[in-house]
Every structure is written in structure tokens, then in C-alpha cells.
Image: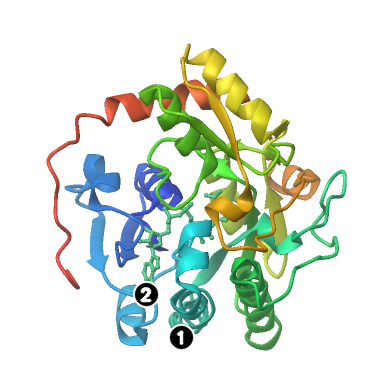
Amino acid sequence: MKSVVTGGAGFIGSHLTERLLDAGDDVVVLDNLSTGASRNLESIVDHPRLTLRRGDILDAAAVADACDGADRIFHLAAAVGVNVIVDHPLDSMRTNIHGTETVLEAARVAGAKLLLTSTSEVYGKNTADALAEDSDRILGSPLKSRWTYAAAKGIDEAFAHAYWQQFGLEVAIVRLFNTVGPRQTGRYGMVVPNLIGQALRGAPMTVFGDGAQTRCFSYVTDVVPAIIAIAEHPDAYGQAFNLGGAQEVSILNLAKRIKQLLGSQSEIVLVPYEAAYATGFEDMRRRVPDNSRAHSLVGFKPATSLDDIILNVAASMQSALIPPAARVMAPGA
Ligand SMILES: NC(=O)c1ccc[n+]([C@@H]2O[C@H](COP(=O)([O-])OP(=O)(O)OC[C@H]3O[C@@H](n4cnc5c(N)ncnc54)[C@H](O)[C@@H]3O)[C@@H](O)[C@H]2O)c1
């Protein structure tokens, strides 16, 4: 089986690539290394069934070439992270809209199945007790760049659904809720690696807003097998599936728990959104998944506790302090 992973040098994509190789697939990774890194694939870079291609999903020829002969495509490449989206709105929208359309078209031409990674951000400011896949979306103004990620991912889903309806493309969508784990970087605004890194350094732990906003964090090794199982299930095509954590926690309590578990002397500091982002920045107060659809179809159950997530991420960040020798991915190689 030949699988293509766009964004395979990223945080989730690298875990997925490892898992697909373990399952016996030939895997082609297509990544422009914008937020991903070669070192994420360090442990598998010499694997005989892995092909690494440095390329952009906006480059239709590169995408078509990577997808030629593919049985299935996992589309993870995207502009990700609040900092990336807010600082580079135009490039982000181009990648997240045109890039996805390019990948969908390559899947159609190759006759490959497609798995699209969308996001819980599509629900926007909906604070329901448990967001189901058919829940309404409540988004802020499209003139606030913060919302362009949710808007673009929503368009991606609509594109994918239309390819399924019009061409019979076998495409399934997963909506990931804050997924965390080893190799996620805090550089682009991800809260868990940021807070853990600050706690490990003894630096002030910065919590934005009043810290009462809640999230449900899931662990990457719980999520990746579910992504693959959904991609393989014929009843998944044309549908979206939430994949999120089970434990709701406020960001302030998350910071307190990290500090306690790691025995950190850091102080926790509340930072107004205006000081971190442009005036008028909006955040979601709450985001809780209803995972029942994914549970019914593929038995998805987020098993890793928040404490274990924190401890595992902290351990991986500490071991990464001694970086392995950097390996370079050749353009188009
Ligand atoms: N991590 C989460 O909590 C989360 C939540 C919801 C959705 N998602 C989705 O999961 C997917 C993977 O996210 P991640 O957390 O691993 O982030 P990531 O930034 O680590 O991965 C994205 C990868 O895509 C690559 N990329 C970006 N633009 C590209 C382009 N134009 N051409 C080729 N490659 C490009 C990056 O270099 C990176 O390796 C994304 O589609 C994201 O929207 C992630």
C-alpha cells in the first residue's frame, strides 16, 4: 500500500508516518518544512519504505508527482498555530484553501482515498457541553485574521464533501481538538509545550486572558491510530469525525497542574490578549468534543490522562535538549 502524508515532517504527521511504516506501507512525505522539521523524522529517515520530498502543496506538479500511484493520502499540511495565522494571514489562507484543493484534485486524478485533517476551530465560539459534528459554527468577523483558520478549514471540508458528492472521491474528515505530544513545538503559539517549556526553565508561565477558557487535550498516540482507522473505514467517506480529549481543563488550572507535577518554581502570570495579539483578539471560552461518532465507528477512546500527557511531553522536551545531528531533506528528493 502506498500512502502519502502531506505535512509528514510536522508534529502529528511524523507520528502518523512512523505508524504507517510500522503497518507495512510505503510512505511518501511531502512537506515544505515551514513549521515541520527533518529532525521529527530522525528515527525513520533511513527507512527503506520512506521517501521524503521537500515541496509545497501549492505546487500542483509536486503534489501530483508525490501522489502518483498512491492508494491513500493523509492530508495534514497546513498553516497551523495562532501566531502563523495572525502574522501571515494571506499565505495561511492560500495554503489552507488552495493547497487543500490541489491535494483533493491530485487524489481524484490518482484514484486515491483521502483523509483530511480539519479542526475543532471550525466550531468557533460555540460553547456547547459537547460539540457534535453537526453542531452550529459561531465564528467571529472574517476581517479578524484569527478566524481565517477556522474559515479556511471549513471551506476545506466543504471542498472535500463536494469531491465526494460529485466525483465519488473516498474522502473522510477528522476534526482534531487540541492534540499534544512529543515533537509539538510551542513556537507557533501551542499552549502545552509553551507552558511546559516555561515551567522547565523556571520562567514565568504565561496564561492568556483570565485563564478560565477551557480545552480538552488529547494525546497524539491516541489520535493517530483513530485517524488511520477512520481512513480505512468505508462508512467514513463523506463524513466528519471529532477526535478530542476526555478531560476538560481551564488553561489556568492546566498551568497550575504543570507547575505542580514538574515541581517548578515558575510563577503563573496572566497576560491580557491585547498584550499578546492585536487589539480585539478573540478566543474560544470552551471547546468540548462529543467523540461518540468516532467511538461508534472505530472505537476511539482517548486513553491518556492529562497528567500522563504533561509528564510525557516534559520528558520528551528534556531529552530533546541534546538535539540529534540535523539531517537535511533535499528539495524534490
Ligand atoms: N495539533 C493540533 O492540536 C491540531 C488541532 C486541529 C487540527 N490540526 C491539524 O492537523 C494537521 C497537522 O498539524 P500539526 O499540529 O502536526 O502541525 P505542524 O505545523 O507540526 O504540521 C503541519 C505540517 O505541514 C507543513 N506545511 C505547512 N505548509 C505547507 C505547504 N504549503 N506545503 C507543504 N507542507 C506544508 C509544515 O512544515 C508542517 O510539517 C494540520 O492540518 C492541522 O490543521 C492540528
> As shown in the figure, which amino acid type bears the numbered disc 1?
Val
Q: Position of residue 312 (x, y in %)?
A: 45, 24
Earlier residue among tags 1 and 2: 2
Q: Position of residue 44 (x, y in %)?
A: 24, 44
Which residue is found at the position 20% from the left and 48% from the top?
45
Which residue is found at the position 48% from the left and 11% from the top?
263
Within 10 Å of disc 1 (Cα), the crowding (few <14, some 14-19, many 20+) is: some
- Say which of 224 and 185 sits in front: 185
Looking at the image, how many numbered discs can be counted on the residues? 2
Q: Is residue 235 visible?
A: no
- Say which of 56 and 140 sits in front: 140
Rendered view: 308 above or below 25: above
Judged left or right of residue 137, residue 33 is: left
> As shown in the figure, which amino acid type bears the numbered disc 2?
Cys
Task: Report how far apart the C-alphas of labels 1 and 2 lie in the structure.
Answer: 9 Å
- The residue that disc 1 covers is 109
- Secondary structure type for disc 2: helix
Rendered view: 21 above or below 104: above
Rendered view: 159 above or below 217: below
Q: Which mark is residue 67?
A: 2
Callout 1 touching callout 2 (CB < 8 Å): yes
